[in-house]
Image (cartoon, rainbow, N blue to C red):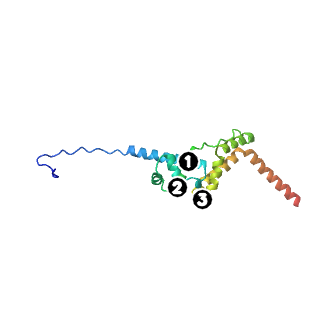
Amino acid sequence: MKSLTRSRGRSRAPSPTRAYDMSNRAAQAEATRERIRQAAVALYRERALDGFTLEEVAQRAEVTVQTVRRAFKSKDQLIMTALIALADETQPIKIPRVPGDVAEAVSIFFELYEEVGDFVIQQLGDEPRLPGLKSELDAGRRGHANWIEQAFAPGIEMLGRLEIELEAAAAGLVR
């Protein structure tokens, strides 16, 4: 039977301490989070929030559901992270080269709506179920209104002047 005590007279030199490098592990964890995020983005592009499960996200990301939960805590947090990733991917909306060029503005709008229209409609439908979407959608609404003002500025100004003239004419008729 082997002795469990150290033999006398022989002392071991302490083993050199090895520095543990967490950077590789951190990079792997971030790569896993990114795969999960991209899986959620892909699923969200295909269907509404209620249309996919964490199991489907895990399967697409090639991880377990537990890994998805550990990385994102909840489906809502995962979806908000995916939406931020989607917003970052979206190209800025072009402005017509000449303000008031209706043909170019309509062309730009059609191109934009073809690219993201279905997704925006889906987000609008999901807004009541995911209150965190409100701030993103409100920013989108403001951006859309600003785009309209810039793209159609000459026409909007003309309509404003016409409205004033019509009000003045109507007031003159009433006298």
Residue found at the far front of this picture: 1
Q: Could you say which quadrant of the image residue 114 lies in?
A: top right
Residue 169 appears left or right of 55? right
Which residue carries the number 3 mark? 129
Does label 1 or label 2 sit earlier along the sequence? 1
Q: Callout 1 environment at 10 Å: few (<14), some (14 to 19), or many (20+)? A: many
Residue found at the far left of this picture: 9
Distance, label 1 to label 3, CA atoms, is 18 Å
Residue closer to the observer: 168 or 8: 8
Quarter of the image where the C terminus is located: bottom right
Q: Callout 2 environment at 10 Å: few (<14), some (14 to 19), or many (20+)? A: some
Does label 1 or label 3 sit earlier along the sequence? 1
Q: Amino acid at mark 1?
A: Val
Q: Position of residue 95 (x, y in %)?
A: 67, 41
| Residue at horizontal 60 percent and vertical 48 percent from the top | 46
Q: Callout 3 environment at 10 Å: few (<14), some (14 to 19), or many (20+)? A: few
Residue found at the far top of this picture: 97
Q: Amino acid at mark 3?
A: Arg
Which element is circle 3 on? loop
Which element is circle 2 on? helix
Distance, label 1 to label 2, CA atoms, is 12 Å
Q: Amino acid at mark 2?
A: Lys
Is residue 155 in view? Answer: yes
Is residue 99 in view? Answer: no
Residue 42 appears left or right of 153? left
Which residue carries the number 1 mark? 41
Which residue carries the number 2 mark? 75
Q: Position of residue 9 (x, y in %)?
A: 11, 47
Distance, label 2 to label 3, CA atoms, is 12 Å
Does label 2 or label 3 sit earlier along the sequence? 2
Q: Position of residue 14 (x, y in %)?
A: 20, 46
| Residue at horizontal 85 percent and vertical 58 percent from the top | 171
